[in-house]
Image: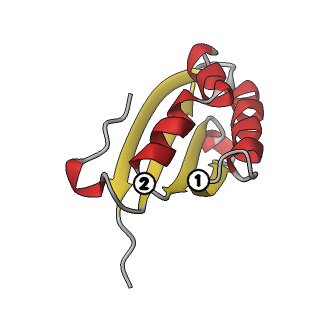
Amino acid sequence: MATLPESLKNKKFIFIAYLTAADGKADEMQTLLADIRKFSNSNDEPGCLTYRTTRGVGEESNKFIVIEEYADEKAFNFHMSCEKFLALTKSGTIGDIKFSFSEEFQ
């Protein structure tokens, strides 16, 4: 799905996912993302430093933005293989997805 840029492989980075729910699937997507958020922000996924979920309002209510921060590539790969994330990818709720990687600066 997402390939981590070589320059970020051994350091902390931010991953932002822009999701559009398939028709009629926005509420289900929200539930699945909430499950992932709960897991990712727990001690069960220590390499995930931040996992925040947002949902658009009004005509944009089928659009979601997820802001994630990982300690390193190992943490990101663990997240992408966790049961709750895989449930989202197999659910049929994703109509479209775009993503970006970035580094925080001071």
In the image, taking residue 98 as reference, residue 20 lies left or right, namely: right
Amino acid type assigned to the residue bearing label 1 in the image: Cys
Q: CA distance from mark 2 to mark 1?
A: 9 Å
The mark tally for this picture is 2
Q: In the structure shown, which secondary structural element does the residue marked by tag 1 occupy?
A: strand
Question: Is 52 rendered above or below residue 106?
Answer: above
Measured as percent of width and height from the top left, residue 25 is found at 68, 21
The residue under label 2 is: 72
On screen, residue 69 above or below 61: below
Residue in the foreground of this view, choosing between 38 and 77: 77
- Locate the N terminus and report the quarter of the image it occupies: top left
Residue 48 badge: 1
For the point 72% across and 45% down, the residue is 44
Locate residue 2, reporting x and y percent. Answer: 36, 35
Mark 2 secondary-structure assignment: loop
Name the amino acid, label 2.
Asp
Colour mapping used in the image: secondary structure
